[in-house]
Image (spheres, rainbow, N blue to C red):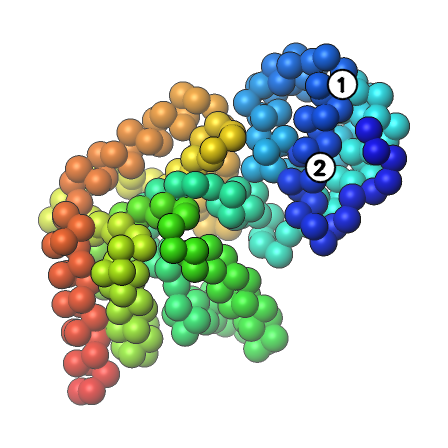
Amino acid sequence: MAGKNLDPSSSPRALLGAELRVAREAAGLSQAELGEPLFVSGSFIGQLEAGTRRMHIEFARQIDDILSTNGFFVRNCGAAAKSKYPDHFAAAAEAEALATTIREYAPQLIPGLLQTEAYAREVFRAGHPTGTEEVIDELVVNRLAQAALLHDPTTPLFWCVLDEGVLRRGGDKPSVMADALRHIARLTRSHRIIVQVLPFSAGLHAAMGGAIKLMSFDDAPPLAYAEGMGTGLLFDDPATVTHHTLTYDLLTANALSPRKSLALIESVAEDYEHDQHA
């Protein structure tokens, strides 16, 4: 184990995970064997090693003791834990950046990966009515950095189910909503994303409880993320991930086809444009 600290500017979580794998293998332990005294699964250790999970300080202390790494993980845990995202979303956002496939159900808002700058600004202003422009600007910059994941022409594969309420919930600036929906339509027509709309006519459905995000990786077990107002939970338990995957599959089965969804998105965008001119 190297004795120097990790460089926080060079993907600290991935570096910390790589060092964990080296130290674990040097100690002759499997992922499950390291996880046992930590009371976590072997897949959790695999996610720490792949950088899809954040190493908390209590785990760092125990790992240093078990692997005799002379405080290495405690010293570097702080750098790896730094995030520009809120605490409840940080782990999911950082895992999202490493995912090869992302599937998401959005019940209220256009997903962060699909938001335009103007739409993001309106959303953050609605949530922070007394926030300074500097605060809003920082939130928007971070949101656009998240959306930059889709600048790559092939990865990650992004498949989204939008509740029809997402399309209909416009603000007091119809042009912002029109542009936001046109942006989704452009990404769809360029074959960069897959989008389906769950119409109001579908009635009650399997995800009435809130948003769902499913992420899969090349070198780590899949994760599921469920989000509410100011809260979010990241799951790696296979049974829970399987349950959320089934829920998402039921949503896609009840949603409009991608072709009909695109037609509806563009039609609603035209309605907002007409409202703007009126």
**260 and 234: which is toward the camera:** 260
Residue located beneath label 2 in the image: 16
| Rendered location of residue 122, percent (x, y) | 42, 71
**106 and 194: which is toward the camera:** 194
Counting other residues with Cα less than 10 Å from the Cα at mark 2, is it few (<14), some (14-19), or many (20 or more)? many
| Rendered location of residue 67, percent (x, y) | 79, 20
- Please, what secondary structure does the residue beneath circle 1 have? helix
Residue occupying image coordinates x 72% and y 12%: 28
| Rendered location of residue 99, percent (x, y) | 47, 41
Counting other residues with Cα less than 10 Å from the Cα at mark 1, is it few (<14), some (14-19), or many (20 or more)? few
Relative to 173, say whether 9 is above or below.
Answer: above
Relative to 145, say whether 78 is above or below.
Answer: above
Give the Cα distance between marks 1 and 2.
15 Å
Query: Which circle, 1 or 2, is nearer the viewer?
Result: 1
Displayed quadrant of residue 264? bottom left
Q: Amino acid at mark 2?
A: Leu
Residue located beneath label 1 in the image: 26
